[in-house]
Amino acid sequence: NDVDGELVNLFRMTKQHPEALEREIALNLYSREEFWRQQKSSPEVLTEIQRAARMYYLIKTSFGADIRSFGCTPGKDVSVIKNLTDVHQRIKKVLIECKSYEKLIPAQDGPGTLFYLDPPYRGTEKCYSTSQSWTDEEHIKLRDLLGTVNGKWILSYNDDNFIRDLYAGRNIEHLERSNKNGPQDGKTGRFPELILTNY
């Protein structure tokens, strides 16, 4: 599930029409001019296959996959999705949704459910194209909703004191990953994250 309809469409086309999507992507060339042409184009006038190819192209060619700035990485091949057949096989029976977490979680909750949630990281909301409305109140609403579920959940966040306080009493694991967008800790280029669970 994702609230970004263009990303959801990419998954849906991978699930339903992988061959057609692969043919559309095969026409892509890696260039700054093409990036800006695709970035400024209106998805509303494209077919679903063209929309999916456009989204894939913007993800692959943008800096940090932000779909807003050209990545300028020499030697990148954007004319093929590696392992597309494997991805198709993995998601061909998967339900793909485009709902807010407030609607999706109650609808899918149950004792046997495992939710994995990846909300906008606190303080970086501007980096997401669909999360401008995420304020501290929204993070609190998510925490409160997760407190009502019957299933289990895994939640990933950036390592932030507000988030640590918000989920005090839950299982919190600290880890680090490499960061494509530059150093976060001022020196090593590692990005500190939290994995939180209710089990």
Image: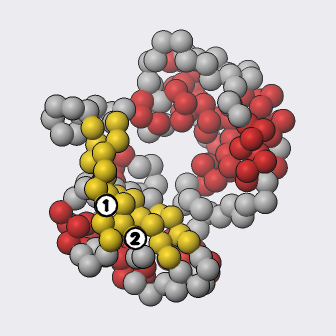
What is the CA distance from the residue labelled 2 to the residue labelled 1?
9 Å
Q: Position of residue 84 (x, y in %)?
A: 73, 37
Q: For the residue marked with disc 2, what is the amino acid?
A: Thr
**Label 2 Cα neighbours within 10 Å, binned few <14 / some 14-19 / many ≥20:** some
Q: Secondary structure at mark 1?
A: strand
Seen from the viewer's position, the closer of residues 135 and 183 is 183
Q: For the residue marked with disc 1, what is the amino acid?
A: Glu
Q: Position of residue 139 (x, y in %)?
A: 33, 70
Q: Quadrant of the C terminus?
A: bottom left
Quadrant hosting residue 66: top left
Residue 48 visible in the shown view = no
Q: Label 1 near label 2: C-beta < 8 Å?
A: yes
Q: Quadrant of the N terminus?
A: bottom right
Q: Which residue is mark 2?
A: 197
- Give the residue drawn at x 68%, y 41%: 52
**Label 1 Cα neighbours within 10 Å, binned few <14 / some 14-19 / many ≥20:** few
Q: Is residue 84 above or below residue 122?
A: above
Q: Earlier in the sequence, mark 2 or mark 1?
A: 1
Q: Is residue 148 left or right of residue 39?
A: left
The tag on residue 73 is none
Q: Is residue 86 above or below residue 148?
A: above
- Give the residue drawn at x 28%, y 56%: 174
Q: Which residue is mark 1?
A: 173
Q: How is the image coloured?
A: secondary structure
Q: Is residue 150 left or right of residue 81?
A: left
Quadrant hosting residue 68: top left
Q: Position of residue 148 (x, y in %)?
A: 44, 87
